[in-house]
C-alpha cells in the first residue's frame, strides 16, 4: 500500500472513531478498577450494613463489582474493532446494552453461588426475591456505566481538541513561509534566468518542492529520509543566494532513514540557523547537522555560529521551536525533548525522540 | 556623459542581475560592485559614483547605515534602496527624494528610478542621511580623514569626550575627532553607553570600577584606558546603583 492510501485509511478511522478508550490497555483497566472500587465504597457507605459490618460489605461488593468491571473490560477489548465502526449514539447504546446483559448474567451467577455459600443468612436478603437483586444491580450498573462513558467521552473530546489545536498551529507555521525567503528566491531565479537557464530551471523545481512540502496536508508523520530531503532542497536554494558564505556540514549517516518524524522538523531548524547565524555574518559560517542513534533514541543537533554583534533571537525562532516541541510531544509524548540555547559562540538546538519505524 | 552606478548587494545573483539591467540602460554605466556595506563605503570614496543601488538587508553594515555614513562625503551619491520585502526600517524614507525598489526589480521601475536619481539636487540627496539618522543605530562610527572614511566598530569605542568645539571618540586603536554632538550620540547609543559627566559618554562594557579621591571627587576607570574619567556628582549615585561598582 502506498503512503497516500495508508494516510486515507487512517483518516477514515479517525473520523469514525468512537470515544471509547482502548480497554486492552493497562491504564484503562486501572481506570475501571478505580471506578468499581469507588462505586463499591459508595454502596457500602450508603447501605451501612449492620449485620455484616462495613469492611466485609465493602469487600463483598468490591469482589462483585470487579468481576463485572473486568469481564466488561475484556468484552469491550475484544469488541473494540466492531464498536469503533459504529456511530456515536449506536455505539454508546450497544455498550450500555452489553453491560446490562453482562450484569444480569453475573448477578444470576452470584445469586447461585451466594445461595450455595449461604450468604443470604448473614446479609438479610430475601432468598426468593432474586428479581429485585437483579434489577437493582442492572440499574446501578447502567447509571455508573453511563457516567463512565460520559467521562471517557469528555476526555476523548478534550484530547481531540488538543490535537486539533496542534494541527492548526502546524498549518499556521506552514503558511508562515518567511516572505524574505520567497522574494529572495524569486530574485535569484530572475537573475539565473538570464545567466544560467538550466540552473534557473532547477531552482524553480526546488522551490516548487519546498512549497509542496510546506503546504502538504500529509505532513503530520513522514519518514526522516523525506524530511532530510526537504532540508537539502532548502539548503540548495539558499546556497544559490549565499554562495560560499553558507557551508552546511551534514553528519547524519548513523540516522535510521525510516524513523517517523513530524513533517517540517529539521528544515525549520536549518532555516533558523541560516537566517540567524549565517546571513548576518559578513564572512558567513558553517551550520552543522549531527544525527545520532543510540539505544533506540534519535538525537538531532543543529548548531550555528552567532553573529558578531549581540543580536537577540527574533520571535520567529522561538515560534518555530515551540511548534516543533509541541508536535514531537504529540507524537512521542514525554519521551521527546527539545533543547535550545547558546553555548560559547554557538547556538545549539537538540531534538531527542524515540525511534519508531514506519509500519510496513 | 553617462552617470556612474555602484551596485551594493551581498548576494551574487542579485548583483549580477542588476549589472546586466543597468548595462542595458542608456545613460548609465557600472562604476563597480560591492558585496557589503564596508566595501561599498570604500568604493564610494574611491570611485565617486553618482548613484548607489543599495540593498537594505546586508550583514555587518546594512544599507541604511551605509546611507548614513555617506552623508559625511562632500559629494554624496544619490541612493536607491533595494529590498526584498517591505522593510519596517524604510518607513523613515517615505520621501520624494528617495526611491526604493523591490526585488525582483522590474526594468521599467529601475529605469524610472535611475532617471529620477540622476536629476536630484544636492539638498535632496542629503535628505537620505537625515532620514537614516532616525531609522537606525549605527554599528560603526565613521571618521572622515585625509585618506577617506575610517569605520570604528561601536563595540571598540571606549568613550566619547566633548571639548568646547569638538567631540573626540576614544577607541581601541587611538582617538579621532567627529562631528556628532554628545547629546545625539547619547540618544543613539542609549542601550550600551552611559553619560557620566557633562562632557563624557562611556561604553558600559568597558566599565571597570569607580573610585573616589581625597576631595570626594568620583572617577571612573575604563578597561584599556589609563586615564580615569571624572564623574559628575549628580551621575555618581546613579552609576553606582546601576552597575554596583
Image: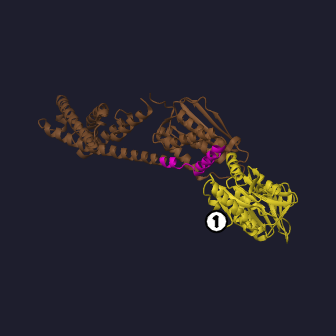
Chain colours: A brown, B yellow
Q: Is residue B238 visible?
A: no
- The question of residue A182 being in magenta is answered with yes
Residue furthest out toward the left: A128
- The question of residue A358 being in magenta is answered with no
Q: What secondary structure is marked by label 1?
A: loop
Q: Which residues are magenta?
A: A171-194
- x and y percent of residue B195 in the render? 76, 66
Quadrant location of residue B81? bottom right
- A98 vs B116, left or right, is left
Q: Is residue A239 above or below residue A79?
A: below
Q: Is residue A221 above or below residue B181?
A: above
At 42% from the left and 46% from the top, the residue drawn is: A164
Q: In front: A131, or A72?
A: A72
At 61% from the left and 46% from the top, the residue drawn is: A185
- Chain where mark 1 sits: B
Q: Is residue A222 above or below residue A309?
A: above
- x and y percent of residue A269 in the render? 59, 43
Q: Which residue is mark 1?
A: B94
Q: In front: B57, or A36?
A: B57
Q: Is residue A298 visible?
A: yes
Amino acid at each position: 500500500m502506498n503512503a497516500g492510501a495508508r494516510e486515507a485509511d487512517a483518516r477514515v478511522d479517525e473520523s469514525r472513531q468512537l470515544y471509547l478508550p482502548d480497554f486492552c490497555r493497562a491504564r484503562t483497566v486501572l481506570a475501571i478498577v478505580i471506578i468499581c472500587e469507588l462505586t463499591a465504597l459508595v454502596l457500602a457507605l450508603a447501605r451501612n450494613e449492620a449485620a455484616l459490618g462495613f469492611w466485609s460489605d465493602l469487600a463483598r461488593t468490591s469482589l462483585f463489582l470487579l468481576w463485572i468491571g473486568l469481564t466488561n473490560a475484556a468484552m469491550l477489548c475484544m469488541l473494540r474493532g466492531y464498536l469503533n465502526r459504529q456511530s456515536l449514539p449506536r455505539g454508546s447504546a450497544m455498550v450500555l446494552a452489553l453491560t446490562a446483559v453482562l450484569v444480569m448474567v453475573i448477578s444470576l451467577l452470584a445469586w447461585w453461588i451466594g445461595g450455595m455459600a449461604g450468604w443470604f443468612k448473614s446479609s438479610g436478603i430475601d432468598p426468593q426475591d432474586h428479581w429485585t437483586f437483579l434489577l437493582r444491580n442492572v440499574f446501578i450498573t447502567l447509571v455508573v456505566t453511563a457516567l463512565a462513558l460520559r467521562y471517557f467521552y469528555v476526555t476523548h473530546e478534550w484530547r481531540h481538541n488538543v490535537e486539533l489545536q496542534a494541527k492548526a498551529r502546524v498549518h499556521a507555521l506552514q503558511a508562515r513561509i518567511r516572505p524574505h525567503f520567497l522574494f529572495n528566491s524569486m530574485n535569484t531565479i530572475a537573475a539565473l534566468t538570464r545567466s544560467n537557464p538550466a540552473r534557473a530551471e532547477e531552482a524553480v523545481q526546488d522551490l516548487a518542492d519546498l512549497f509542496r512540502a510546506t503546504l502538504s496536508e500529509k505532513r503530520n508523520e513522514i519518514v526522516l529520509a523525506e524530511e532530510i530531503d526537504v532540508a537539502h532542497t532548502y539548503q540548495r536554494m539558499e546556497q544559490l543566494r549565499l554562495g560560499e558564505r553558507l557551508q552546511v556540514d551534514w553528519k547524519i549517516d548513523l540516522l535510521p532513514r525510516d524513523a517517523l518524524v513530524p513533517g517540517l522538523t529539521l528544515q525549520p531548524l536549518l532555516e533558523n540557523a541560516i537566517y540567524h547565524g549565517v546571513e548576518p555574518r559578513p564572512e558567513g559560517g558553517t551550520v552543522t547537522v549531527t544525527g545520532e542513534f543510540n539505544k533506540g533514541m534519535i538525537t538531532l543537533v543543529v548548531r550555528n555560529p552567532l553573529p558578531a554583534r549581540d543580536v537577540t533571537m527574533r520571535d520567529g525562532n522561538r515560534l518555530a521551536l515551540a511548534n516543533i516541541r509541541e508536535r514531537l510531544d504529540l507524537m512521542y509524548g514525554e519521551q521527546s525533548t527539545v533543547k535550545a540555547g547558546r553555548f560559547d559562540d554557538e547556538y545549539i538546538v537538540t531534538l531527542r525522540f524515540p525511534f519508531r519505524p514506519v509500519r510496513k | 556623459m553617462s552617470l556612474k552606478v555602484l551596485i551594493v548587494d551581498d548576494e551574487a545573483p542579485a548583483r549580477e542581475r542588476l549589472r546586466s539591467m543597468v548595462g542595458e540602460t542608456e545613460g548609465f554605466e557600472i562604476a563597480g560592485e560591492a558585496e557589503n556595506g564596508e566595501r561599498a563605503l570604500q568604493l564610494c570614496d574611491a570611485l565617486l559614483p553618482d548613484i548607489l543601488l543599495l540593498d537594505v538587508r546586508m550583514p555587518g553594515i546594512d544599507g541604511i547605515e551605509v546611507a548614513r555614513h555617506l552623508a559625511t562625503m562632500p559629494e554624496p551619491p544619490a541612493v536607491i534602496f533595494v529590498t526584498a520585502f517591505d522593510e519596517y526600517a524604510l518607513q523613515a524614507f517615505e520621501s520624494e527624494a528617495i526611491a526604493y525598489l523591490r526585488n525582483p526589480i522590474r526594468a521599467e521601475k529601475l529605469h524610472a528610478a535611475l532617471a529620477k536619481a540622476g536629476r536630484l539636487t544636492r539638498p535632496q540627496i542629503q535628505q537620505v542621511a537625515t532620514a537614516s539618522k532616525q531609522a537606525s543605530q549605527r554599528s560603526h562610527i565613521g571618521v572622515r580623514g585625509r585618506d577617506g572614511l575610517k569605520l570604528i566598530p561601536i563595540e571598540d569605542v571606549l568613550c566619547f569626550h566633548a571639548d568646547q568645539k569638538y567631540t573626540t571618540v576614544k577607541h581601541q586603536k587611538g582617538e579621532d575627532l567627529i562631528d556628532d554632538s554628545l547629546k545625539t550620540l547619547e540618544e543613539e547609543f542609549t542601550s550600551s553607553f552611559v553619560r557620566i559627566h557633562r562632557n563624557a559618554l562611556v561604553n558600559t562594557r568597558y566599565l571597570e570600577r569607580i573610585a573616589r579621591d581625597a576631595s570626594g571627587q568620583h572617577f571612573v576607570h575604563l578597561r584599556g584606558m589609563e586615564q580615569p574619567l571624572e564623574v559628575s556628582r549628580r551621575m555618581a549615585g546613579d552609576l553606582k546603583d546601576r552597575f554596583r561598582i
